[in-house]
Amino acid sequence: MTPAWLVPEWPAPAHVHALFTSRVGGTSLPPFDSLNLGWHVGDRPAAVAANHALLRQATGVQAVFLSQVHGTQVALVSSATPPAPRADACVTHQTGLACCVLIADCLPLLLTNRQGSLVAAVHAGWRGLAGQGGYGILESALPHFNVLSDPEGRDARSDVLAWLGPCIGPQAFEVGGDVRDAFVIHDQGAAALFAAQTTGKWLADLPGLARRRLRALGVDNIYGNDGGASWCTVENASRYFSYRRDRISGRMAACIWLS
């Protein structure tokens, strides 16, 4: 595994494996240098295929990627799942199958439980996180998680472990008032995660918003991205792709699987 990749530091069971790739260690040429995993960004198909082969070699499992649309759909996946289901999160309890999401500024979340009975990968841009009527991608994903982890219906969210990966940081994510309103209208406390700018714009703390939403849903075991500069995709150009920074950009992957 490339040293520049991240392996979550969290108390997941030993048979739960997870990683977040960086832009380092692949075959793509600039501006997609070098480990671009996105097929849709204009990179050479042969280079993307070679990069996916490197990911398969590192994980040793079949990867499931999604057609991400900044929505709230969740796909329950297995080895029989057709390629690229239209969703922004995927969940599985099958071993040897990696749930994956592609990232270039949005927030990746990896989920498991203390028992390691299932895993999930979530793509959370501000649209998916805010959702509609206060019901976003996390509100969609966690009920699936609860049902699968405890078929008898016990509320198992206290057993959920969440890891937040790199994303655009709170000093770089400038948004309009519409984005702030999408969160604050349903949660007045979310206003503390938006810093007013003299331009009339706001700086939004995306990982902070996700942490707040997770805790409201009963998930307190949260690890990873704390909003610090080292987690920011925009500010760390040598390590991370960033669509906001470069406009023409590759994609990284957050992956989680059971052995």
Image: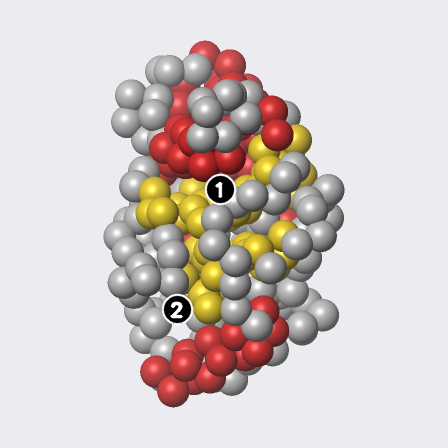
Q: Is disc 1 placed on a helix, strand or loop? A: loop
Q: Quadrant of the N terminus?
A: bottom right
Instruction: List the residue tagged with mark 2.
Output: 38
Q: Nearer the viewer, residue 144 or 31?
A: 144
Q: Nearer the viewer, residue 240 or 38?
A: 38
Task: Tell me the kind of residue under disc 2.
Answer: Gly
Image depth: mark 2 or mark 1 in front = 2
Q: Which colour style is shown?
A: secondary structure
The local crowd at label 1, few if under 14, some if 14 to 19, many if 20 or more residues have their Cα within 10 Å, is some
Q: Position of residue 183 (x, y in %)?
A: 40, 23
Instruction: List the residue tagged with mark 1.
Output: 173
Residue 242, can we see it?
A: no
User: What is the spatial separation of the Cα atoms under label 2 and label 1, in whole angstroms?
Assistant: 22 Å
Disc tally is 2
Mark 1 or mark 2, which is nearer the start of the sequence? 2
Residue 64, can we see it?
A: yes
Quarter of image, res 136: top left
Q: Nearer the viewer, residue 37 or 202?
A: 37
Q: Which residue does the image show at 38% across and 63% down from the upper left?
A: 79
Task: Tell me the kind of residue under disc 1.
Answer: Phe
Q: Which residue does the image show at 33% across and 47% down from the upper left?
A: 75
The local crowd at label 2, few if under 14, some if 14 to 19, many if 20 or more residues have their Cα within 10 Å, is many
